[in-house]
Amino acid sequence: MDRESALELLGNKQFFKLKSELQEMNPADIAALVEEMYGSDEFDEKNLIMLYRILPKELAAETFTYMESDKQMMLINAFSDKELRDVIDELYLDDTVDMIEEMPANLVSRILKNTDSETRKQINELLNYPKDSAGSVMTTEFVYLRRDITVKEAFEQIRKIGLVKETVYTCYVISTHRRLVGIVTVLDMLVADEDTLIKDIMETNVISVNTHDDREDVAKTMSKYDFAAIPVVDNEDRMVGIITFDDAMDVLQEENTEDFAKMAAVVPAEDGYFRTSVFDHAKSRIPWLLILMLSATLTGWISSQFEAQIALIPMLVSFMPMIMGTGGNCGSQSSTLIIRGMALEEIRLKDFFKVVFKEFRVAILCAVTLAVVNGLRVLIVYKDVSLALVIALSLIGTVVIAKLVGAALPMLAKALHLDPAIMANPLISTVVDSCSLLIYFSVASAILHI
């Protein structure tokens, strides 16, 4: 169903047909449809509540988890206590925690008030973990088994509790002290005899993470080993939860969004583009713009030191944008590749000199090519061998320096426990601009004798 059809059915009060159409859709698609409809004049908060109440209970709860936080807040404000409890009962615990983190204090109090004491305790425990830790994104809803039960008994247990767990394909085997001792999959149990003990078919070489491990590192570990879920243990090696693949994808998406913002010299925002106010957008950009603007005064100061040379040969000014632009582009190329390599753990700090040497060789090839092309162009257009030589040599020096700076700065940031993304395009361009001007005017002074 598209946006126009849904608005027409809603406007004509054809609720039965609308319900039938929505029941055939995936919850994520319904949430996306709501977002599309909400931007129109015919759809407002009242329509949102009406549309939600048309949906069957389970479908409504699933759709709720995919909605943006502002739509969730509207619905929670409109819910009765019974409706709110119904939604919370259908949500997995980690989804409930994610929702609560986006809500104002008054709504959080109301949500917690409509949960049972055990659920409330688990929610508070998850909320107490550091924001960027594995514990903050894990769920405590997983299937665990004892190693001394049979396959038949294991399936009976899964049938009893499996519907309220986030995943049942992988089951975790724990000891009497809740220590993780192995994992067993449903496939392992299906192909085994029903009288086989779990300890005889479980995998004991288990990769797990700690509750305080960085969540981005956990997501990368899951990607590396192609895990659908990974167990989380506390400092005493007791299993306390699992992180599923969908949560790991959300983490990587958030981290990538944050890195893109830093690479563009923008303070990362918590909300999406349209849900962030104009004031907040400006506030996130101004600090870096001020820093870069002030740092750019260095290039102005360098230019002022060579006023005499520029006065003698004014044509030198016309080549400055090309020299500086080429340097900035070369630095950005290197920094982007190095930051990506470090993010994928292909490049490590121990590879510093190896990376720098490789970028140096790449820089030589690029520099020579650009120098020859531009040197010939200047020679043909201006018929001036000295000027062509100045441009060619300046480009060689600029490209080499830019490539080395673009490669080295992100790795140095990592060594200082800073995010390499902050050493990306804008900052590197500022550094390279200063270096390129120094090289350009130094070469011009030496060759043109000015």
Image: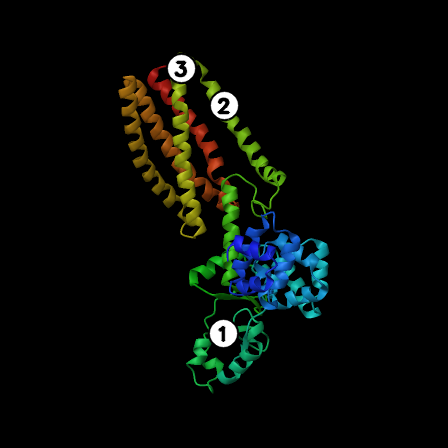
Relative image position of residue 166 (x, y in whole percent): 55, 69
Camera sees residue 138: no
Q: Residue at x 42, y 33 (%)?
A: 328
Residue at which label 2 appears: 300
Residue 59 in view, yes or no? yes
How crowded pointer 2 is (Cα within 10 Å; few <14, some 14-19, many 20+) is rated as few
User: Which circle, 3 or 1, is nearer the viewer?
Assistant: 3
Query: The residue under label 3 is which amino acid type?
Result: Pro
Q: Residue at x 44, y 18 (%)?
A: 306
* Residue plotted at (64% across, 65% down): 87
Which is more N-terminal, label 1 or label 3? 1
Q: Which mark is residue 314?
A: 3
Q: Secondary structure at mark 2?
A: helix
Does residue 171 sit above or below 35 in this rendering? below
354 up-or-down from 154: above or below? above
The correct choice, above or below, for 49 with respect to 362 in the image is: below
Structural distance between the alpha carbons of marks 3 and 1:
76 Å
On the image, the x and y values in percent for residue 38 come to: 59, 51
Q: Quick one: which residue is furthest to the top in this view?
A: 312
Crowd band around label 3 with a 10 angstrom C-alpha radius: few (<14), some (14–19), many (20+): few
The residue that label 1 is drawn on is 182
Position of residue 386 in the picture relative to residue 406 (left or right): left
Pick the residue in front: 139 or 172: 139
Residue appearing at x 56%, y 63% in the figure: 17
The answer to which image quadrant residue 14 occupies is bottom right
Q: Is residue 59 above or below residue 157?
A: above
- Mark 1 or mark 2: which comes first in sequence? 1
User: Front-most of 91 and 6?
Assistant: 6
